[in-house]
């Protein structure tokens, strides 16, 4: 009788497993936040003038408690760049997670699928070819270009019965190459009018990132992240397959369009301030999915934090580590080179290992 009472009092094993899984996921998200915080502190302290972590934290807490030169470097030079980089990384990673949910493949990256390229062309054309075009409207045009790029790739890969990952990847690579050529043409035609500024769109960088760029991307990042979280439940149902999702009452194509549109908002705003940074949307969801699983309620925030940490760290490496490694103190490497060196081999491995499907 006593044993039965103990058994009835103990929770079911499935409930215990679910609680442990939830605790593990929340712990990983918390650790990701700490990783981002550490990357930010390192970024704020690294540069031509090194600043100790304790001094960085002190300056962030009270600007008047440190030297004016230190406060100026942190608050006016490095902090806006680090915050902008964090938002760019977050946007690209969350956009990648959404696109992977749309195509049900780890190859669903904004750069690979032509989303970033479409946004880059739109941003370049409006910035360089339309005199007096308002800067605040650039992310909107980049969003339109990103969405058009995504729709074109999807239409090319569609054969009437569905979309295969191979066709989608090939269509994305081909469209990215074509749009890249168009963007380069726009730059060449606009060199005398300040075309060198568009260099960051071609290779991906945070050279000019300041408070203006931060305030430019912030509303799109917040809105995109909020919409991604609202679509998380629908994305989980979509992952069950079209037939199962339709059986559960989900409008499959409408959900795909909404997820693609949110991804375009995130990727387009990132492109508008940082250019064509490759493979963040491929690498981060790949890692996050192995840490927290495929539940978008946890995958989206994990991707946001890990993507932000990755790009802040990559930008620090491009700005400080790589120039020191090659003894080029006066040259800054584009952050897109660092992410390509990390994410490129992963892309080749996914294709080689034939892990293009879930």
Image (tube, grey):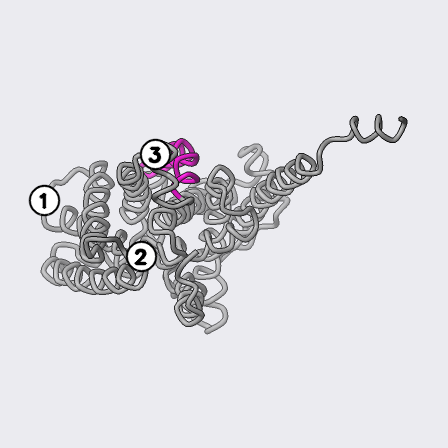
| Direction from residue 312 to residue 113 in the image, left or right | left
- The residue singled out by tag 3 in the image is 250
Q: Nearer the viewer, residue 135 or 76?
A: 135
| Sequence order check, earlier mark of 3 and 1 | 1
Q: Is residue 142 above or below residue 343?
A: above
| Sequence order check, earlier mark of 2 and 3 | 2
Q: Is residue 45 above or below residue 220?
A: below
> Which residue is found at the position 14% from the left and 60% from the top?
182
Q: Is residue 193 something one can see in this rendering?
A: yes
Of the 4 image quadrants, the one containing the C terminus is: bottom left
Task: Please name which of the two marks, 2 or 1, marks the residue nearer to the observer.
Answer: 2
- The residue singled out by tag 1 in the image is 131
| Direction from residue 159 to residue 79 in the image, left or right | right
Q: Is residue 300 above or below residue 342?
A: above
| Direction from residue 134 to residue 301 in the image, left or right | right
Q: How far from the left and from the top, in percent, is residue 277?
A: 34, 56
Task: Rate crowding at label 2 as few (under 14), some (14 to 19) or many (20 or more) other CA atoms within 10 Å.
Answer: many
Q: How far from the left and from the top, in percent, is residue 311?
A: 44, 52
Task: Rate crowding at label 1 as few (under 14), some (14 to 19) or many (20 or more) other CA atoms within 10 Å.
Answer: few
Identify the residue at the far front of this view.
1
What are the residue bounds of the magenta stretch? 216-238
> Which residue is found at the position 63% from the left and 41% from the top?
21
| Sequence order check, earlier mark of 2 and 1 | 2
Residue 114 sits in which quadrant?
A: bottom left
Q: Which mark is residue 111?
A: 2
Circle 1 SS class: loop
Q: Nearer the viewer, residue 353 or 67?
A: 353
Of the 4 image quadrants, the one containing the N terminus is: top right
Q: Nearer the viewer, residue 119 or 197?
A: 119
**How many numbered marks does the figure carry?**
3
């Amino acid at each position: 009788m006593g044993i039965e009472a103990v058994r009835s009092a103990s929770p079911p094993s499935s409930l215990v497993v679910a609680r442990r899984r939830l605790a593990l996921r929340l712990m990983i998200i918390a650790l990701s936040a700490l990783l981002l915080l550490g990357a930010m502190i390192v970024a704020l302290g690294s540069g031509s003038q090194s600043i100790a972590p304790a001094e960085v934290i002190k300056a962030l807490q009270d600007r008047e408690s440190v030297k004016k030169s230190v406060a100026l470097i942190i608050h006016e030079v490095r902090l806006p760049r680090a915050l902008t980089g964090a938002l760019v990384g977050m946007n690209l990673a969350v956009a990648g997670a959404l696109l992977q949910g749309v195509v049900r493949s780890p190859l669903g990256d904004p750069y690979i699928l032509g989303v970033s390229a479409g946004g880059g062309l739109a941003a370049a054309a409006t910035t360089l070819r339309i005199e007096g075009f308002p800067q605040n409207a650039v992310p909107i045009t980049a969003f339109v270009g990103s969405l058009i790029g995504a729709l074109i790739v999807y239409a090319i890969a569609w054969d009437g019965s569905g979309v295969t990952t191979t066709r989608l990847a090939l269509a994305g690579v081909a469209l990215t190459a074509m749009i890249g050529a168009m963007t380069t043409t726009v730059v060449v035609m606009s060199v005398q009018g300040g075309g060198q500024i568009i260099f960051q769109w071609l290779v991906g960088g945070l050279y000019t990132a300041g408070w203006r760029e931060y305030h430019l991307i912030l509303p799109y990042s917040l809105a995109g992240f909020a919409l991604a979280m609202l679509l998380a439940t629908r994305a989980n149902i979509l992952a069950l397959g079209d037939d199962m999702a339709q059986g559960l009452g989900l409008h499959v194509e409408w959900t795909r369009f909404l997820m693609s549109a949110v991804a375009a908002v995130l990727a387009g705003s990132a492109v508008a301030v940082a250019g064509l940074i490759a493979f963040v949307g491929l690498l981060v969801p790949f890692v996050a999915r192995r840490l927290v699983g495929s539940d978008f309620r946890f995958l989206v925030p994990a991707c946001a934090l890990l993507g932000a940490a990755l790009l802040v760290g990559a930008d620090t490496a491009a700005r400080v580590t790589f120039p020191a490694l090659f003894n080029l103190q006066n040259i800054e490497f584009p952050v897109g080179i660092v992410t390509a060196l990390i994410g490129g081999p992963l892309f080749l491995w996914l294709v080689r290992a034939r892990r293009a499907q879930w």
